[in-house]
Image: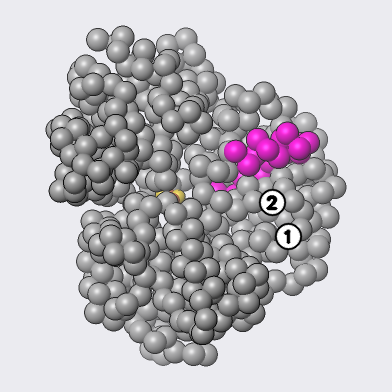
Amino acid sequence: MYQPAGPFPSLVIRAETLVPRGSFAEAQAQFLDVDPQLTAALDAKLEKQAVGVVAHFYMDVELQGVLSACHWPHVRISDSLKMADEAIEMAEAGMRSIVVLGVDFMSENVRAMLDASGHKDVAVYRVTTDPIGCSLAESAKKLEYGAFLTQAAQVPRSLHVIYINTSLDVKAQAHNLVPTITCTSSNVVQTVLQAAAQVPDISVWFGPDTYMGENIRELFEGLCELDDDAVRALHPAHDRNSVRDLLTRFHHFKQGSCVVHHMFGQQVVETVRDKYRGAFITAHLEVPGEMFRLALDAQHSGRGVVGSTANILAFVAERVESAAREAGSHRLRFVLGTEAGMITAIVRKVQNILSETGGDVEAEIIFPVASEAIAQSDDEQLPIVPGVAAGEGCSTAGGCASCPYMKMNSLDALSDLLARLETKTNGQLDGYHPQKYTELISGRSAADLGGEPILHMRALQRTGELPAALIDDLLSRH
Ligand code: SF4
């Protein structure tokens, strides 16, 4: 085994080989080398039963390795924004069922969007009958979140911008109190700016991710220091003054965080600064401010990116492609400031680029490890092992920044579900469906009401504007 060139494990991606550095990276690399018989068997089962699979980038690395090697065209791995779109495409292509590999808010989102697009007959399954939670989604169920919304409801022209990482009933209850639109990490900045462009004196209430709220505020404060043309390049209806004005009415929830992105704190940042000079820095918008600032500074000089998982993947791909088209050999290093499961998509993308371009490039992906992700053990030979004592943040499929909820999806669980689907009788698989949320809120089912903020987001994605129904709702509540 190669030892890491720095304190963090890393995986060096070459055109046809992977070189893991450190035991964590070795586990990642091992699962990317997939047995073709395994994928052939999975392809056959999915095709036989007309099943589509939508999986999140943070899936278990073994499962993602197999999925990414499948030939069945209705298997996709993406960010949460695209998962529902892909499920709709699969339904339109004739799939009878969609398996969602992610956490529960993702399967609820897919169910709501299939219903809204006329595909109520297409079944949606999760791979376990246990709830698959999310620390962020739980934050929005706290009493404090209710208080945050109650405060918002008392302010005229309030718009609640809720992160998609929340359950459907939370979205429904919130929308009942304050007009609500969902957002993802890839569209949150544009959503807030567009809302302020369309509604003078709007008050924006963002939640539940506290770090993301703080990072958005800091981003807007940074815009106030730029010249007006630079601000207009981000959103044509804004200049420094309009952003400064918006900041006085931008509020974010102060008690919500993702257990995974929380690990990218000061200690990780200091190590990256000291030991990984010259590396490209990537960071998800959910990371703490120290990491956000590091990546944002890097972004300003063209050496990094802050954004969604899709933004991070696009940044790595773009850098590798441009180096591959230059003469000579190149060695690029990227600090991965998000959940480690992203590595599968990055490896597949980078190797595709290198095989298409024939470029001589090595891309090293560095996985920051927080000391919180190191547990003490009683074993005299192994006093320190990867993984925090409570198991959060690490799993046997990987260590470090690894989401324990996402890892409730496994290859075994998927195979088990497909076997059950083959022999199912009515009602037998009820526990595998997303929750139905049939309770009524102001005369509408929670599922229907909670789907509306997602439909508002999709309308914004399609047209570039907040839909008239949302604006009317917002202006008519006071
Ligand atoms: S990484 Fe896990 S805990 Fe964090 S927001 Fe995603 S699902 Fe929730």
Residue at image coords 76%, 66%: 38
Q: Position of residue 398 (x, y in %)?
A: 49, 70
Magenta-colored stretch includes residue 305 = no
First to last magenta residue range: 85-102
Does the image show residue 168? no
Instruction: Say above or below: 336 vs 197.
Output: below
Magenta-colored stretch includes residue 97 = yes
The quadrant in which residue 256 appears is: top left
Q: Earlier in the sequence, mark 1 or mark 2?
A: 1
Residue at image coords 71%, 40%: 90
For disc 2, the marked residue is 75
Q: Secondary structure at mark 2?
A: strand
Residue 59 as seen in the image, left or right of residue 118: left
Decide: few, some or many residues near mark 1? Use Cα within 10 Å; few <14, some 14-19, many ≥20: many
Quarter of the figure with the C terminus: top left
Q: Amino acid at mark 1?
A: Cys
Report how far apart the C-alphas of labels 1 and 2 lie in the structure.
7 Å
Q: Position of residue 432 (x, y in %)?
A: 64, 40
Label of residue 347 in the image: none
Instruction: Say above or below: 446 vs 283.
Output: above
Residue at image coords 53%, 68%: 321
The quadrant in which residue 375 appears is: bottom left
Label of residue 70 in the image: 1
Instruction: Say above or below: 279 vs 69.
Output: below
CB within 8 Å, label 1 to label 2: yes
- Depth check: give the residue in front, 133 or 331: 331
